Image (cartoon, rainbow, N blue to C red):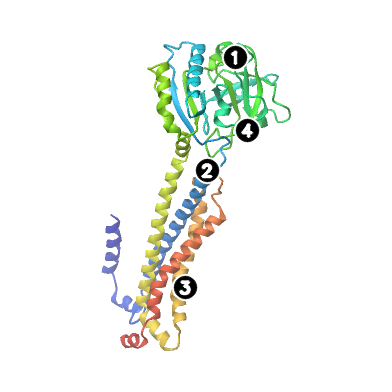
Amino acid sequence: MTALVSGVAPAFRGTGVSTADALREGGRGGTAGAGRQRFRSALVIAEVALSLVLVCAAGLLVQTVVRLHRRDPGFRSDHLLIAHIYIPPARYADSAAIARFCDAFARRVNSLPGVLGATIATGYPPMIGWKQMFTIDGRPATRMEDVPLVRFAGVDDRYLGTLGISLVNGRDLAESDTADSQPVVLVNEAFVRRFFPDRNPIGQQIRPESPPGVSAAPLEDFGGSSRPIVIVGVTNDFMNDGLALPPQPQIFALFRQLPGLNFGFKDIVVRTATDPMGMAPAIARELRSLDSDIPLGEVRSMATHMGNQTADTGFTTMLLGLFAGLGIVLAAIGVYGTIAYLVAQRTQEFGVRIAVGASARDILWLVLRSGLSIGLAGVTLGVAGAMMVRQFLAGLLYGASAADPWTLAGAAVLLLLVILAASAVPARRAMRVDPVQALRGE
């Protein structure tokens, strides 16, 4: 369809050509009609503008991918294996049975040669999706929408050590924190900044709340204890809402202390001394020895998992980069074709100019100026277009502004250099015009 439209439109225009008008517009030795020349230039300007928009978008996304890979995740992401297990309620009917199975599995994995640490939890960085409502003692909420909602993970006492998350205040969870002892939790620095900005969070008491729509559930049925939960430690901030967003308030609770929040869906995270995927068969064997009906699922390294977090942005970047490259090529071809046609039409003019004393440098600048004027018009239009589409890019960017002046300037300079290079070939041809031949043709 594009080929038909591109070919038929000029053909129709050719059938309506008036001989007198044609001779008046482009007589002997003259240039092409001004209207047709403006139309060609407008098409090339549009190509340059669209190419600039694509180059800017690709450049911004490349910066985003680079910054995401360089961002400090707040934990040690190297040599980690992660996998998922599901503990069926048919055979593990209560929280105590689930906790016993998890402890036994973690102990077996920790005893394997090459394992530096293993933990079982309900979530791990860089995305912890479970959100939990809670209340702070002394700060009653009168409406459900006023109840705080934060990231939550049920963990064991090996969690921080295995993942390499630092403790910045208080103490870590310990084996002495049993199902019968005082329930305790850890929170992160983002939690402290939001809920305890002016006082020490250590020793503060919180209580789990019912999820939305279950506000009538008794606390002892939901959280497993009518006693408040005490904050005993504060961790550093780490990625818990994806790679591109800032850390959100986080609570770590021992799942063995909160029966109402101890479900069969669990993840195991293992830190190894060597390639983490090489330990997968041994870990699977330990799981089968405990329960042959529970598979080790979704086994992958943390490096692969982190890479998957940027897969969409990386694919978009690659696609836009490809389009930007094609756009630059098309813009270069368009400029070359337009300037080459202009040079062919003005051959006699160049011959006359050379005959009356114009230097090769004068002819070169005359041709390059035509290409540069097209380029500047396209770049100006492209910058305006890039500013218009920045709102669509904002959600994909991290650490870069959609209106970054350096990216816009770099894209503009790149396009202008390509245009000058495309104009240089016909310009060199114009410099070699033989005035004798040109005047003989005239």
Q: Between 54 and 72, which is closer to the camera in this rendering?
A: 72
Question: Are the two marked residues, 4 and 1, in contact with CB atoms closer than 8 angstroms?
Answer: no
Element under label 2? helix
Alpha-carbon span between mark 3 and mark 1: 81 Å
Q: Between 282 and 270, which is closer to the camera in this rendering?
A: 282
Mark 4 — residue?
Answer: 236
Mark 3 — residue?
Answer: 369
Disc tally is 4
Tell me the kind of residue under disc 3.
Arg
First along the sequence among labels 4 and 1: 1
Nearer mark to the viewer, of 3 and 4 = 4
First along the sequence among labels 4 and 2: 2
How far from the left and from the top, in percent, is residue 102? Answer: 49, 18
First along the sequence among labels 3 and 1: 1
Quarter of the figure that contains the C terminus: bottom left
Give the residue displayed 70% in from the left and 31% down from the top.
197
Element under label 3? helix
How far from the left and from the top, in percent, is residue 297? Answer: 40, 26
Label 1 environment density (alpha carbons within 10 Å; few <14, some 14–19, many ≥20): few
Tell me the kind of residue under disc 1.
Thr
Question: Are the two marked residues, 1 and 2, in contact with CB atoms closer than 8 angstroms?
Answer: no
Left or right side of 284 for 144: right
Alpha-carbon span between mark 3 and mark 4: 59 Å
Tell me the kind of residue under disc 4.
Asn
How far from the left and from the top, in percent, is residue 152? Answer: 56, 25
Question: Are the two marked residues, 3 and 1, in contact with CB atoms closer than 8 angstroms?
Answer: no
Mark 1 — residue?
Answer: 178
Label 4 environment density (alpha carbons within 10 Å; few <14, some 14–19, many ≥20): some
Element under label 1? loop
Q: Residue furthest right?
A: 198
Mark 2 — residue?
Answer: 68
Label 3 environment density (alpha carbons within 10 Å; few <14, some 14–19, many ≥20): some
